[in-house]
Amino acid sequence: MSSVATPAPVPHRRRRRRTKLQRRQTRLAWLLLLPALAVVVFVAIYPLGKTVYQSFTNQEFLAGLTPTKRVGFSNYHTLIHDTIFRDTVVLTIKFTVITVSFEFLLGLIIALVVNSHFKGRGVMRAIMLVPWAIPTVVAAKMWLWMLDDTYGVVNDLGMRAHILSHPHAWIADPSTQLAAVCAVDVWKTTPFVALLLLAGMQVIPKDLYEAASVDGANQLQQFWRITLPLLRPAILVTLIFRTLDALRVFDVFQVFFGYRLGAQSMAVYNQSTIVGDGHVGYGAAMSVAIFLIISLFVVIYVTFVRVSEQ
Amino acid sequence: MTTATEATGAAIRPVSRSVRLRRSRLGRTLVKLPFWLLIVAIAVYALFPFYWALRSAITPDPQLFSTPVDYFPSHPTWAHFDDALSSSFFRRALLNSTIVAGSVTLISLAIGSLAAYALGRFHFRGKSFVLYLMLSMTIFPQIAILGALYTMFSGFHILGPIDFPKLYDSPWALVFSYLIFTLPFTIWVLTSFMRALPGDLEEAAYVDGATPLQVFWKVLLPLIAPGLVTTGLLAFISAWNEYLYAVSFIQSPSHYTVPVAITSFTGSSGNAFQFPWGTVMAATIVVTLPLIVATLVLQRRILAGLTAGAVKG
């Protein structure tokens, strides 16, 4: 955040009346920020506070049935013993670990390949942006059809290549359901991860590589000693953003499995508790728990960065 | 870089077989072959699902629902596209999504550019606090406030005679709630554009007696126009693609946005026992095409905007 300290372009002739000018500037700045802050307060901060409050009540969406009252920690108590919720947490974390590692490794390979000079690099970069730009719901639908148990192309290819002996029901079979959602997410997001890493690679000065190859370092050494260390900030930011995104996954799971038990992500279960069942109070407690789980990951990343920087 | 390696390598070592191989034209192609295979594999991986959607959209139903699978439709048809586009439900969804995503984008750009002006060109206490607030908002999990928004939208009392309007099942619920992810992002990226501008033009305008708002409107805004286009497009895409809030706050099919419509497609053709995959694939192509075109045209700018948003933390 060093760039925050850039001096504001205060005209020189006004420097003499600095304090008065500064006060005017500050007032104007806050005035300009007012609409944005009002929106943020109304759209994010107030609802967040409301969620925390609701989590200590027994509020139902159809409030006529049971009058809302404060119930202390009882929602949280129920939540800890809610095995469905526990399963969704485990499934979501599995999903996160699998997708983020695949996306990172594949993305790094793709970024290295596309980073070398060749004709059509621009086209390649454009192609890579395409899966990222389409709605996740659309990507999920496309894959749902490709994974269709009777007419799906994945089964057809698998049988032609003699990998599969008979068509497989990828979505219905609980042992392949996680692989199926991961496949969509990896397909949709890997190119984007690659592009972020590529952007990081392109700011590494070329002379470093030239100097290294004059000194006789081979490509692999150059990768380990130059590319990887200098890419570290880009890698960390990419990993953090991807992890947070994966932990709040909703679209793919909901499109693939609906609200099927045992195939819900944290967000899917939370949404169905609030919107489907109308348990606003209990759902709010779950939202707070999810928020804390995600924050925990942020804290882990940040400590990791701090420790490894010392 | 590779030429440097080859040159030094050739100078030190006696000319080896591999170097001789690399020098001939055919040899060079052969050495590069694995590289090009990799490039092709990446492109096929990224594009195959689109090909498959397109192929399924133009394959007539009898071939679509038969095994073994037909890789190239022998009798392409527009029937599925006709079916998708003639469905008033889907057309309605396209219109709703355009209105919602368009309004969200315009509001974010208007409010966001004012805030970015303050954050990028002014000096004041609390500036870094606001910046960090916006940054933390960009990673805010939307699910965390689903219940609160859900109850807010069904109407509640604010103060005195003021009631929050009942937004449930109205597109305005989506416009309002989408601001939570478009606005902080817009502010963050536009601030980085504002900050990158040189101060001279602004100073010249001040010397000529312009007010700060005139400077903003006549000098800075035209200069960051490319940034506005990029940020606007990114905000539009994220609003166009949103699903969680759309599926939670909208109930009547006439208010569905595109992602919700795609998941609840039943189509009018096809028989009662077969899901209308051809029509759904045609619909996905219709929805995706504008996004793909916009992305391809503005590719460089999008990348610049995304890296400004993601890497500058």
Image: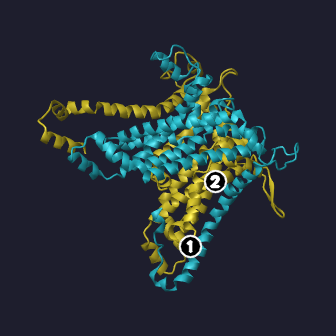
Q: Which of the 4 quarters of the picture holds residue A78?
A: top right
**Nearest the camera: A284 or A114?**
A284
Which chain is painted in yellow?
B
Which element is circle 2 on? helix
Q: Which mark is residue B180?
A: 2
> Residue at point 78% right, 38% down?
A277
Query: What distance separates the C-alpha of mark 2 from that of mark 1?
Result: 26 Å
Question: Residue A215 at x, y = what percent?
Answer: 21, 47
Given contact means CB atoms under 8 Å apart, are the residues at marks 2 and 1 in contact?
no
Q: Which mark is residue B213?
A: 1
Kind of residue at disc 1: Leu
Query: Would you place residue B22 above or below residue A150 in this image?
Result: below
- Chain letter behind tag 2: B
Q: Earlier in the sequence, mark 2 or mark 1?
A: 2
Kind of residue at disc 2: Ile
Q: Which mark is residue B254?
A: none
User: Given the current orientation, which residue lies at the most extreme left position?
Assistant: B14
Crowding around mark 1 (Cα neighbors within 10 Å: few <14, some 14 to 19, many 20+) is some
> Residue at point 70% right, 58% down?
A42
Q: Is residue B249 visible?
A: no
> Residue at point 76% right, 43% down?
A75
Which chain is painted in cyan?
A
